[in-house]
Image (cartoon, rainbow, N blue to C red):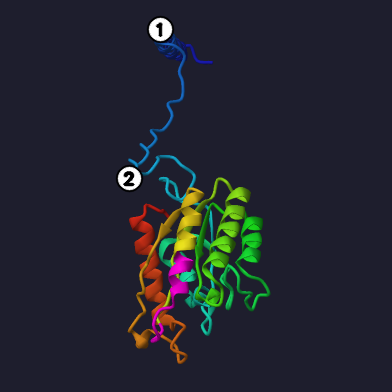
Amino acid sequence: MSTRAVPVATAILAVAAVLLTACGSAGSPREVPAAQPAPPAPASGVTAGASTATGTERPGLVVTIGDSIMAGLGLDQDDAWPALLASSTGADIVNLGCSGAGFLAVGDCGTDFDGLVDDAIALSPDLVIVQSSDNDLDADEGEITDATASAIDRLHAALPSAQIVGIGTLWHLDEVEPEEVGWSSVALQDAVEADGGVFVSIGQPLRDRPELLQWDGEHPNAEGQQVLSEAVAAALGSAGVIL
């Protein structure tokens, strides 16, 4: 080793000693965690941090239960309003809509809404959207009320942490709206709210708009499904339900 390098090495050791002394006087060095963003302020009437749909966090899986309008009868599955809602919001939605089904009526899938409740429970969703149906028109008010309450109660008992949202029955035919349509909506509202859920009404956005219906004058075409999707999204937003 060259004798001229010794002063340089000595100087380096001296500087290192000074640095170690400075660290010791201030305490051992530690890693400073990255700053975390503050949680968003809760909306009015909404509990912050809740895992349900009315909290500030988006739900995980969303399941929808309904009839042929929800199922998108006559259209591609991607054109049904739950699929459109999923596309516009980024929500993970499984559509259990069954043509011909109601809380009492057995649909093309071989079951009524009670069977669809079983399917929903098996998926363990965070949010379940249920829409009452005009397929129960042949039943009396008491039958509709009892069947609706039974299905919603069972859904809530099996999924106590899930948010349940009810949507009123659609009727946009030219005929006078039967009283069963009102019964079914009221029955669903009472059942959902009794179990701590949320009921929303989207009105009848397709009434007197034949251009939004298929040839049968009953089921929405692709444009009509888009209108329903937007109406549902607006109603959920007004109710504080986050997707």
Looking at the rendered image, the disc whose residue lies closer to the viewer, 1 or 2, is: 2
Q: Residue at x 39, y 82 (%)?
A: 176
First reached walking from the N terminus: tag 1 or tag 2: 1
Q: Which residue is mark 1?
A: 25
Q: Residue at x 33, y 84 (%)?
A: 209
Pick the residue in front: 183 or 204.
183
Label 2: few (<14), some or many (≥20) within 10 Å?
A: few
Residue 150 coordinates in the image, percent (x, y): 60, 57
Pick the residue in front: 12 or 25.
25
Q: Is residue 164 left or right of residue 206?
A: right
Q: Is residue 4 visible?
A: no
* 151 is higher (above) or lower (below) than 53: below
Residue 130: within the magenta? no
Residue 84 coordinates in the image, percent (x, y): 45, 70
Quadrant position of residue 113 = bottom right
For the C terminus, the quadrant is bottom left
Q: Residue at x 40, y 41 (%)?
A: 47
**Disc 2 on helix, strand or loop?**
loop
Pick the residue in front: 41 or 130.
130
**Disc 1 on helix, strand or loop?**
helix
Residue 176: within the magenta? yes
Hey, what amino acid is under mark 2?
Answer: Ala
Q: Residue at x 35, y 70 (%)?
A: 203
Q: Which residue is mark 2?
A: 43
Hey, what amino acid is under mark 1?
Answer: Ser
Quadrant position of residue 49 = top left
Pick the residue in front: 124 or 101.
101
Q: Which region is colored magenta? A: 173-185
